[in-house]
């Protein structure tokens, strides 16, 4: 069995500090009351929330990598969203606003650097104005703090380089290094006697008939004959969430489709060109928000992302390819239906991904002074987007349980794309409440 040996975290001093794993032959004689699968920001927030709420429970968190928070929690824009876009009453709308406040409060308490550069959603064509007004009404209905409409002549007073006919301004939109938050949450979890087991890649979730008290057996793919037993299980597996759900006896649908998002960044000498998040008015025909300007907490300014299919779920280089991952989604009926709806959009995104000048041309609609020589390639990320059999992107956060003998003992986070990082601490509260009700947890 595993016995973790962890360096002390100091996220406010060094947010990129690695977590290391030590292995011994000692075993956990009594198993765990609850295990969490997934060491991204949502899994860590859930584990931390449950161990604080239920201090008598013995908890562990299983992460397949040698460090936590290496995928979506690290490779993202770093924007703290305010909840403008989401359908009123949806989980995204409610949890984003709650998560916004919790994120700022947590950063203040833990002294994690953040900024509030605000956000402009800019209409640059007359045909975009009705959609902008509708989006503003939605923002008001969602109670987005401080949001206002800005006439074109006043846009430059907020962001001098930006041009447009009209804009929504959200002064409380922020930026942060979400990995710094994730590492701090890991520190909180360990400090509350949680066990963080790194290098544990879940390959089987089984009923263990020989253990009445801890009936769930979770097997590690990376180490032969290595497993842990637990009473209850919560999974927050991000890019692998559908696969983890399936091996527990849960439905295979919705399917996770990996979308690769490539970013550009302003060259160092041009990093002062913009200081505010600048977003387009989202086109309702397409499933993504579009490319935008995003200041970073380290002083960089990122531009993007693109949105193209990734041929490897965790493939961050454009040349990465996994036959298993590709066959997994190519044969999925829902993807064929999605592709038939958005073929033109997809081809355009691939073109912008290959040719920087095409991406810059689009961005010049908002910042006319931008030139191709002002940008360079930055890193890419992969978005885990759930898709149903009918070709519909699952729009809201989604939770599910398994079937069979141990199904009632398991809770899955099936879909938590953007604003998942902003909402992580609010999602943790919801998951904790659902787990308490489903599992009968008591303080």
Image (cartoon, grey):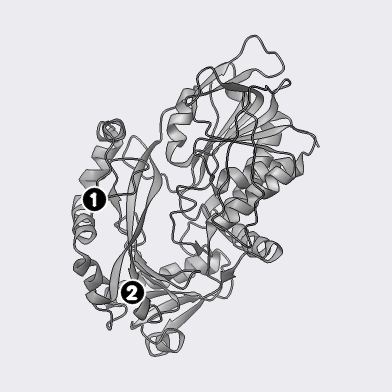
Of 154 and 62, nearer the camera is: 62
Q: Quadrant of residue 277?
A: bottom left
User: Which residue does the numbered mark 1 point to in the structure image?
Assistant: 342
Question: Circles 1 and 2: CB distance less than 8 Å?
Answer: no
Residue sitting at x 70%, y 38%: 194
Whether residue 182 is visible here, answered yes or no, is yes
For label 2, the crowd category at 10 Å Cα-Cα, with few meaning under 14, some 14 to 19 and many 20 or more, is some
Which of labels 1 and 2 is toward the front?
Answer: 2
The residue where tag 2 is placed is 267
Q: Quadrant of residue 402?
A: top right
Instruction: Say if 32 sits above or below 388 in the image.
Output: above
Q: Quadrant of residue 130?
A: bottom left
Of the 4 image quadrants, the one containing the N terminus is top right
Residue at point 29% right, 68% down?
Answer: 376
Furthest toward the top, the residue is: 210
Q: What secondary structure is found at the residue carrying circle 2?
A: loop
Mark sitting earlier along the chain (1/2)? 2
375 displayed left or right of 60: left
For residue 62, the mark is: none
How far across and how far down the image is residue 68, in percent? 54, 45
Residue at image point 63% right, 43% down: 46
Q: Does residue 81 lie above or below 421 as drawn?
A: below
Q: Secondary structure at mark 1?
A: loop
Q: Is residue 43 above or below residue 160?
A: above
Horizontal arrangement in the rendering, residue 317 relative to residue 149 (left or right): left
Q: Position of residue 244 (x, y in %)?
A: 48, 30
Q: Position of residue 43 (x, y in %)?
A: 58, 42
Q: Is residue 383 left or right of residue 218?
A: left
Is residue 93 shown to the viewer in this render? no
How packed mark 1 is, by other alpha carbons closer than 10 Å (few <14, some 14-19, many 20 or more), is some
Report whether 8 appears left or right of 379: right
């Amino acid at each position: 069995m595993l016995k973790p040996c962890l360096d002390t975290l100091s996220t406010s001093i060094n947010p990129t500090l690695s977590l290391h794993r030590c292995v011994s032959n000692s075993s956990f004689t009594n198993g765990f009351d609850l295990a969490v699968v997934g060491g991204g920001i949502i899994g860590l927030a859930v584990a931390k929330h449950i161990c604080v709420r239920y201090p008598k429970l013995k908890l562990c968190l299983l992460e397949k990598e040698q460090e936590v928070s290496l995928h979506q929690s690290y490779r993202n824009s770093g924007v703290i969203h305010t909840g403008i876009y989401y359908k009123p009453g949806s989980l995204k709308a409610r949890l984003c606003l709650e998560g916004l406040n919790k994120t700022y409060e947590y950063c203040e308490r833990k002294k994690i650097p953040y900024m509030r550069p605000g956000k402009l959603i800019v209409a640059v064509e007359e045909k975009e104005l009705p959609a902008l007004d509708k989006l503003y009404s939605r923002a008001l209905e969602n109670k987005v703090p401080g949001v206002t409409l800005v006439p074109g002549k006043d846009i430059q007073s907020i962001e001098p380089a930006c041009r447009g006919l009209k804009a929504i301004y959200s002064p409380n939109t922020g930026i942060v290094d979400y990995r710094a938050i994730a590492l701090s949450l890991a520190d909180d979890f360990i400090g509350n006697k949680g066990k963080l087991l790194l290098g544990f890649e879940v390959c089987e979730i089984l009923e263990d008939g020989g253990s009445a008290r801890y009936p769930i057996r979770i097997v590690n793919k990376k180490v032969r004959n290595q497993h842990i037993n637990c009473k209850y299980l919560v999974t927050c597996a991000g890019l692998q969430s559908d696969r983890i759900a399936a091996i527990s006896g849960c439905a295979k649908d919705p399917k996770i489709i990996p979308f690769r998002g490539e970013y550009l960044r302003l060259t160092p000498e041009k990093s002062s060109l913009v200081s505010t998040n600048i977003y387009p008015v989202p086109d309702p025909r397409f499933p993504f928000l579009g490319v935008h300007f995003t200041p970073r907490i380290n002083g960089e300014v990122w531009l993007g992302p693109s949105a193209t299919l990734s041929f490897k779920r965790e493939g961050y280089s454009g040349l990465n390819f996994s036959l298993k991952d590709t066959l997994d989604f190519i044969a999925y009926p829902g993807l064929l239906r999605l592709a038939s709806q958005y073929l033109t959009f997809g081809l355009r995104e691939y073109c912008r991904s290959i040719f920087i000048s095409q991406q810059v041309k689009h961005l010049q609609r908002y910042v006319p002074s931008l030139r191709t020589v002002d940008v360079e390639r930055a890193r890419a990320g992969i978005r885990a987007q759930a898709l149903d059999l009918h070709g519909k992107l699952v729009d809201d956060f989604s939770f599910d349980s398994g079937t069979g003998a141990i199904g009632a003992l398991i809770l899955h986070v099936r879909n938590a794309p953007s604003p998942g990082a902003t909402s992580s601490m609010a999602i943790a509260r919801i998951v904790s409440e659902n787990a308490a009700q489903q599992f009968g947890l008591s303080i």
